Image (spheres, helix red, strand yellow):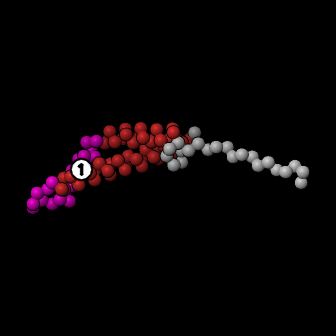
C-alpha cells in the first residue's frame, strides 16, 4: 500500500509537468502562428505559453493529482499494479 502511495505521488508530479508542457506548448504554438510580420514569434510564443500555464496552474495540479490517484488506485500506472502471491512450487515428496 505504501508503494502505491509513493508511486502515485511520483506520477502526479510527472503528470503535472507533462500537462504544463502540453498547455504551454499549445499556447505558444498558437501565439507564434498568429504573429504578424516584424514580430518575434519565439518571444511571443514563450510569453503566451508562460501566461497560459500560470493562469491554469491550479487546474493542472488538480487534474494531475486526480489522474494519478485514479491510476494508482486502479493499478493502471506503472509501479502500482497489485502483486499477486507467487504460487508455491510443489516438490516431489517421493524423491
Query: In this rendering, does residue 44 appear at all?
Result: no
Residue at image position (49%, 46%) is 77
In-front residue for pair 56/33: 33
In-front residue for pair 84/4: 84
Q: Position of residue 23 (x, y in %)?
A: 29, 48
Left or right: 40, with 65 as reference point: left
Query: In this rendering, does residue 62 appear at all?
Result: yes
* Residue 4 falls in image quadrant: top right
Quarter the N terminus occupies:
top right
Residue at image position (40%, 47%) is 15
In-front residue for pair 37/9: 37
* Residue 55 falls in image quadrant: top left
Residue at image position (37%, 50%) is 18
In-front residue for pair 90/7: 90
Quick one: label 1, few (<14), some, or many (20+) residues within 10 Å? many
Q: Secondary structure at mark 1?
A: helix
Q: Position of residue 36 (x, y in %)?
A: 11, 57
Residue at image position (75%, 46%) is 88
The stretch drawn in magenta includes residue 35: yes
Find the magenta span and give its range.
34-56
Quarter the C terminus occupies:
bottom right
Q: Which residue is mark 1?
A: 27
The stretch drawn in magenta includes residue 63: no
Left or right: 51, with 16 as reference point: left
- The overriding secondary structure of the stretch rendered in magenta is helix
Q: Position of residue 17 (x, y in %)?
A: 37, 49
As drawn, the residue found furthest toward the right would be: 94
Amino acid at each position: 500500500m505504501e508503494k502505491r502511495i509513493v508511486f502515485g505521488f511520483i506520477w502526479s508530479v510527472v503528470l503535472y509537468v507533462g500537462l504544463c508542457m502540453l498547455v504551454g506548448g499549445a499556447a505558444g504554438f498558437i501565439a507564434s502562428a498568429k504573429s504578424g510580420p516584424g514580430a518575434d514569434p519565439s518571444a511571443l510564443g514563450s510569453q503566451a505559453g508562460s501566461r497560459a500555464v500560470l493562469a491554469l496552474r491550479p487546474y493542472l495540479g488538480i487534474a494531475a493529482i486526480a489522474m494519478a490517484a485514479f491510476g494508482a488506485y486502479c493499478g493502471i500506472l506503472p509501479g502500482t499494479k497489485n502483486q499477486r502471491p507467487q504460487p508455491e512450487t510443489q516438490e516431489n515428496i517421493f524423491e
